[in-house]
Image (cartoon, helix red, strand yellow):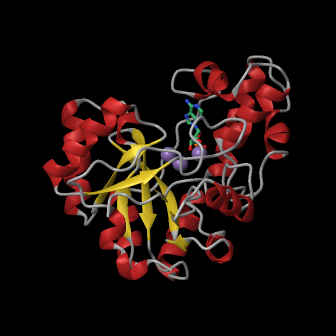
Amino acid sequence: MSILNADLHCHSVVSDGTLTPEELAARAAANGVELWALTDHDEIAGQHRAAAAAHAHGMKYLTGTEISVTFAGETVHIVGLGFDPDDPEMQRGLNDTRGGRGARAQEMAEQLAKVGIKGAYEGALKYVGNPELISRTHFARYLVEIGACKDTSEVFRKYLTEGKPGYVPHRWATLRDAVQWITRAGGLAVIAHPARYKFTANEEYALFSEFKAHGGQGVEVVTGSHTAAEYVRYADTAREFGLAASRGSDFHSPGESHTDLGQLPYLPGALTPVWELLADRIQ
Ligand code: AMP
Ligand code: MN
Ligand code: MN
Ligand code: MN
């Protein structure tokens, strides 16, 4: 059961990807994906389109999203899979989570103007597919366009991360709310790319413990954000905490993402894949 080309993490123009749900489905299918989920940030407006496109290409589909959470002063991402996309409580929660992005983007632009980068708000907006979902990624694309940096990774390094001139901290959803929205809508909550967080060992332990206590059941082990050593490390963490394992590229854009849809190693054996727990939610 681990030997399945499942890709349960990627982004479309509905959040900060550059392809439509239909273009992603075509690309996933061409790359041999058998089970797919579109997981736009804080947004599920693309879910019905994505499911239809998956079926048109003969792929199985799980509903998905990636919720921004503030935990111990850091931003943590919680992927939700297999929930009811029409669940009103989840829709309200995500709507609230998206709420602060406009003001935050204005503030980012003001800070960037102070270091000589003018018009960044309008510039970022040109790349935005969903007006409620303006993100750092859209600013990064604009800064590459005007030649401020050579690629988006350099923009994040120089401008958009903590301590840098365009970084504006933001309070997202709580861990408990995010996990509850997902589970009460019939889905399964997954800690996204755990190696990316700058937590101490104690903080990471607290994240996994609290996540479990709130009803979270999964962790991404094989993701485009992890190294091979981190696959092994988080396979151990999954076993330690009794969590199911997920696999996803976190693909955003052909020009930017180094891991393409469906192009990851399979999950290590002896782990329970999240799709085993979600068998009755697969469409
Ligand atoms: P936001 O939700 O506006 O804070 O933007 C977060 C998004 O920025 C993530 O989902 C990634 O797509 C992107 N991102 C964050 N850090 C980096 C990085 N170091 N390099 C490239 N993209 C990044
Ligand atoms: Mn993103
Ligand atoms: Mn993420
Ligand atoms: Mn992501």
Which image quarter: residue 21?
bottom right
Q: Is residue 157 left or right of residue 183?
A: right
Please determine whether, in this image, residue 190 is positioned above or below residue 234.
below
Percent coordinates x, y for residue 33 in the rendering: 55, 59
Front in this rendered view, residue 241 or 55? 55
Percent coordinates x, y for residue 140 in the rendering: 71, 32
Please determine whether, in this image, residue 76 is positioned above or below residue 212.
above
Residue at 80 percent across and 17 percent down: it is 116
Percent coordinates x, y for residue 26 in the rendering: 70, 61
Q: Residue furthest left?
A: 240
Q: Is residue 13 left or right of residue 6?
A: right
Q: Which quadrant of the rendered structure holds the N terminus?
A: bottom left
Residue at 83 percent across and 20 percent down: it is 147
Front in this rendered view, residue 207 or 63? 63
Q: Is residue 130 left or right of residue 80?
A: right
Front in this rendered view, residue 14 or 30? 30
Front in this rendered view, residue 41 or 32? 32
Which image quarter: residue 15?
bottom right
Please determine whether, in this image, residue 157 is positioned above or below residue 125.
above
